[in-house]
Image: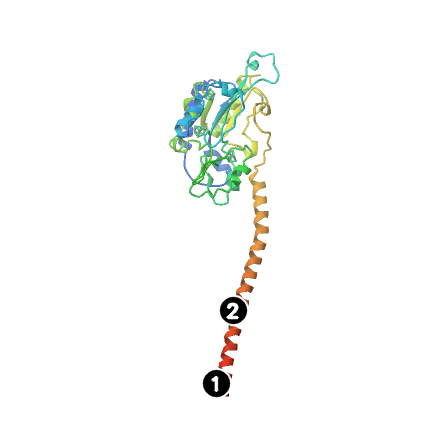
């Protein structure tokens, strides 16, 4: 194919701009939605672990500064997770086995953040609609609606949402926003914009899949034959290419079925059993109120009878 990666990047970025339409859907992506879904393709074979994306994310979202500066590379020696002050982390994974090819002797660097699932478990688990999936693929959070139940944290198959436990007055759930305001205007998000290696490509999901397949075809032996996020949990807006099996570089092995179908079944079960006690309490309350009314009416009638009989005796 006569198309450079940079050329492809420009094409998909323009396509992403055209596709960045904000229409709240709040639920699962339909086949039509997927035509409009935008996302990012992370090529982990290009990432050098410079942490510029972490820094850009921190600044774009005005998050607290970390204890160690973003120039500190020793933090890569420990596997880290996102938390309430960190929406993205880059981890370093040493090869499990050294292959004949030299590029396989280098460690893999992997950027993690919310995957912005097509059918997000967090959205499905949230009973007040504080998390919604927008038609462009971003899964966004509305702190004003959140009641702090943290069902989203339990439901997420990637264990992404974090909670501000230290914030006693106004705690919020925190996770990558997909730089929603930026992608709404055509993007790309801050982390993709800053990457000096162009390891993160932003664009329409259909174009990103074409790019991923083109890269695998054009570079035999460079990638494992798997686009992580194409099918996992029903598909995600963020997708990955890698030189190592994904389970060896920090990715959970997940099925293709979207967990919301499971969480909804659990919720419906819960509410089904919740409904019975509510109905029972309503009936009991009605009986108690009715009994009280009856007793009061009887007392009034007895008092009236007493008064009438006293009047008759006089
Ligand atoms: S900015 Fe790019 S190269 Fe640097 S760590 Fe992030 S993804 Fe990797
Ligand atoms: S990765 Fe987790 S938090 Fe992000 S959209 Fe999917 S279920 Fe929600
Ligand atoms: S998309 Fe925005 S919020 Fe999400 S990791 Fe990138 S910079 Fe951070």
Q: Which residue is mark 1?
A: 311
Residue 106's tag is none
Vertical relation: 274 (above or below) 204: below
- How far across and down, in percent of the image, does residue 109 sit? 52, 20
How packed is label 2: few (under 14 Cα within 10 Å), some, or many (20 or more)?
Answer: few
Residue 134 can be seen in this image: no
- How far across and down, in percent of the image, does residue 64 sit? 41, 29
How packed is label 1: few (under 14 Cα within 10 Å), some, or many (20 or more)?
Answer: few
Q: Is the distance from the Cβ of mark 1 to the nearest ligand 2 atom less than 8 Å?
A: no
Total of numbered circles in the picture? Answer: 2
For numbered disc 2, what is the local secondary structure? helix
The residue at the far front in this view is 314
172 or 93, which is in the foreground?
A: 172
For residue 287, which quarter of the picture? bottom right
Q: Nearer the viewer, mark 2 or mark 1?
A: 1
- What colour scheme does the image use? rainbow
Q: Which residue is mark 2?
A: 293
Residue 60 can be seen in this image: yes
136 or 11, which is in the foreground?
A: 136
3D distance between C-alphas at marks 2 and 1? 27 Å
Q: Quadrant of ligand 3?
A: top left
The residue at the far left in this view is 185
For residue 266, which quarter of the picture? top right
Q: Residue at x 41, y 22 (%)?
A: 194
């Amino acid at each position: 194919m006569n198309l450079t990666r940079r050329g492809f990047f420009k094409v998909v970025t323009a396509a992403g701009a055209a596709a960045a339409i904000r229409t709240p859907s709040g639920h699962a992506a339909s086949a039509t939605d997927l035509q409009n879904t935008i996302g990012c393709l992370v090529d982990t074979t290009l990432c050098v672990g410079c942490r510029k994306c972490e820094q850009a994310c921190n600044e774009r979202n005005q998050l607290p500064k970390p204890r160690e500066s973003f120039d500190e590379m020793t933090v890569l020696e420990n596997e880290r997770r996102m938390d309430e002050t960190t929406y993205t982390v880059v981890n370093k994974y040493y090869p499990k086995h050294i292959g004949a090819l030299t590029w396989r002797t280098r460690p893999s660097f992997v950027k993690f953040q919310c995957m912005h699932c097509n059918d997000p478990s967090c959205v499905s688990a949230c009973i007040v609609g504080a998390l919604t999936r927008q038609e462009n693929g971003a899964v966004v959070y509305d702190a004003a609606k959140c009641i702090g139940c943290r069902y989203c944290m339990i439901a997420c198959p990637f264990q992404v949402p974090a909670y501000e436990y230290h914030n006693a007055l106004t705690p919020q759930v925190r996770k990558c926003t997909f730089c929603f305001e930026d992608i709404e205007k055509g993007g790309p998000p801050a982390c993709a914009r800053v990457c000096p290696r162009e390891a993160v490509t932003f664009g329409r999901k259909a174009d990103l899949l074409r790019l991923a397949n083109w890269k695998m075809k054009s570079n035999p032996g460079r990638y494992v034959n798997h686009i992580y996020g194409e099918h996992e949990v029903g598909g995600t807006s963020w997708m990955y290419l890698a030189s190592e099996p994904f389970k060896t570089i920090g990715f959970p092995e997940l099925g293709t079925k979207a967990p919301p179908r499971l969480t909804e079944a659990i919720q419906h079960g819960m509410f089904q059993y919740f409904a019975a006690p509510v109905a029972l309490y309503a009936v009991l309350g009605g009986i108690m109120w009715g009994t009280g009314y009856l007793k009061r009416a009887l007392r009034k009638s007895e008092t009236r009878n007493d008064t009438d009989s006293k009047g008759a005796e006089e």
